[in-house]
Image: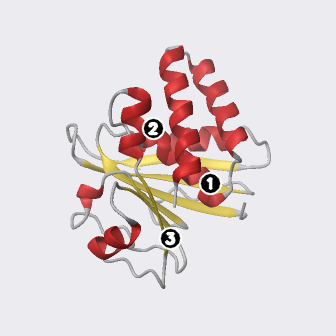
Amino acid sequence: MASKLNIRWHGRAGQGAVTAAKTIAELVAYDPNKYVQGFAIYGAEKRGAPVAAFTRIEDSPIRRHSLNMAPDVVILLDPSLVGIVNVAEGAKEGASIIINSAKEKDEIVKEIGIDPNRFKVYVVDANRISKEELGKAIPNAPMMGALAKITGIFSKDEILKITKELFEEQGKFSNKVIEGNLRSIGRAFEEIS
């Protein structure tokens, strides 16, 4: 993994973008040699409103707390945000853009208007995966698996192991929900293209 990794998440309230940004930060924090931030910006919007969340990962203490970030990775949890959110805005040249979509990569790249010569684009159908594994479309866990695969911040075994440890430690989820999330993460890790 690079010494710095800036990740910007776009989704709608209720899809888990904020939870995913903070969970990835918590998972990376298991490494005593890494420093992390996981935060979001949103107002008093209700479920379905656009939200943006951020994860910073560095090898040294993070002193800045601004929203200014040139992301290395941009994650789009909801493709209906196309036209509302410019996913490539401010992203570094060569940044990875991970999109949750059932469409083929070429089709979604054209729809969003991303220059594939400037950015690396990846697609995974996180909604389908989460529906099959959890019974509803909550794309954040599959997108965490896709992120791990594309960035190399975790191997498949590592992300599954520490996610399980974190979720069990938090005590917020039933075993059924934990197992469904782990299957979702593992499948997206394998299915991202």
Q: Residues within 10 Å of mark 2 (few under 14, many from 20)?
A: some
* Residue 183 rendering spot, x and y as whole percentages: 54, 33
Kind of residue indicated by mark 2: Thr
- Name which of mark 3 and mark 1 comes first in the sequence: 3
* Residue 98 rendering spot, x and y as whole percentages: 46, 60
Q: State the residue in front, 39 or 84.
A: 84
Q: State the residue in front, 169 or 65.
A: 169
Taking 24 as reference, is 60 left or right? right
Q: Is residue 173 visible?
A: no
Q: Residues within 10 Å of mark 3 (few under 14, many from 20)?
A: some
| Residue at mark 3 | 70
Q: Residue at x 67, y 25 (%)?
A: 165
| Residue at mark 2 | 19
* Residue 180 rendering spot, x and y as whole percentages: 49, 27
Q: Nearer the viewer, mark 3 or mark 1?
A: 1
Looking at the rendered structure, the secondary structure element under dot 2 is: helix
* Residue 99 rendering spot, x and y as whole percentages: 40, 59
Looking at the rendered structure, the secondary structure element under dot 1 is: helix
Q: Residue at x 72, y 60 (%)?
A: 1
Taking 33 as reference, is 193 left or right? left
Q: Residues within 10 Å of mark 1 (few under 14, many from 20)?
A: many
Q: Which mark is residue 149?
A: 1
